Amino acid sequence: MADYMDTTNTTSALNNAFASTNASTVRSSTPTNPNAELKQEDFLALLLTELQYQDPTEPMDSQKMLEQTSMLSQLSMQQKTNDVMQKLASQMESAFSMSAMNALGSYATISSSVTKDAATKSLGLPVNFPEDISGATIEVKNNTGTVVRNIELAAMTKGAATIEWDLLNNNKNQVDNGTYTYEVKYTTKDGRQIDMQNTNYLIESVRFQKGEAEFKVAGNYIKANRISEFSAIASSNS
């Protein structure tokens, strides 16, 4: 009977120990570093652990030790380099933001080219008439110089405006993706025909979308790559 009790107690103790081990294993299986990022301190801890549990009769090869310490040094230098580059990028972004804000109240010369891609629903074509007009025509050309759309405008007052192009050609078909240019010809109140060249537009405001500056001209926001020049005064045409 005593032997049976001893066997039962031993079995119970083993089961409890096994259950405790399983619970500990489950708890320890929860990742403490889900992104699996190793830092300099992690490599140092691994190296010290390896030294602590090495076989005294067969110590670690000095060459391997040198390789690991060299790798640790390189990791430290790379970390410092990354930190410096991040700070530099942050400073450059801040400097660009300040430069963009300084453009407020100045004038921008806008490129007469626009680009259509698959996501584009319409394109704004900025115009800036130096005087009241009785009418105007906008010629939109593809990259071969062929006119694909003529947009007729009625009488307008002096000033800047943005004309929306629905991306249809003269046959009312959707144009292909690509880069297009446009030219503006207007008629003055006294009947003169004028070919309008690139003119300057007042920068009304500046905003930042995902860290990129956009400038408001003629009532619409455009990206910096549409602007070919900034100037402090308006051109003679504006």
Image: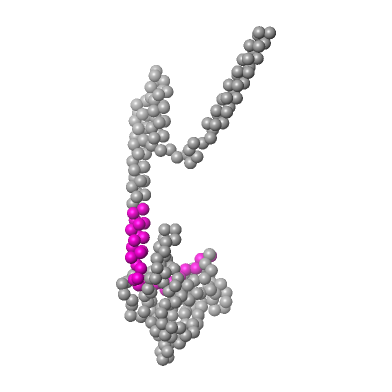
Quadrant in which the N terminus appears: top right
* Relative image position of residue 7 (x, y in whole percent): 64, 13
Q: How many marks?
A: 0
Picture residue at 53% right of the left edge, 73% below the top: 167
Q: Quadrant of the C terminus?
A: bottom left
Q: Is residue 2 left or right of residue 158?
A: right
Tell me, yes or no, whether the highlighted magenta stretch contains residue 104: yes
Q: What is the x, y in percent for residue 166?
A: 53, 73
Can you say whether 71 is above or below 130 in the image?
above
Q: Is residue 146 left or right of residue 233?
A: right
> Who is closer to the viewer here, 132 or 163?
132
Q: Which quadrant of the view contains residue 158?
A: bottom left
Examine the rendering and report whether any part of residue 231 can be seen: yes
Q: Which residues are magenta?
A: 90-118
Above/below status of 2 relative to 134? above
- Judged from this view, the residue extending furthest toward the left is 232
Reply yes or no: does residue 110 show up in magenta.
yes
Give the colouring mode of the picture. one colour
* Residue 77 placement (x, y as % from top left): 33, 41
Residue lying furthest top: 2
Residue found at the very far right of the displayed protein: 1
Please name the residue shown 33% across and 80% down the image: 236
Give me the residue at 33% from left, 77% from top. Answer: 235
Q: Residue furthest bottom?
A: 190
Q: Residue at x 41, y 91 (%)?
A: 190
The spot of residue 191 in percent (x, y) is 42, 91
Residue 143 visible: no
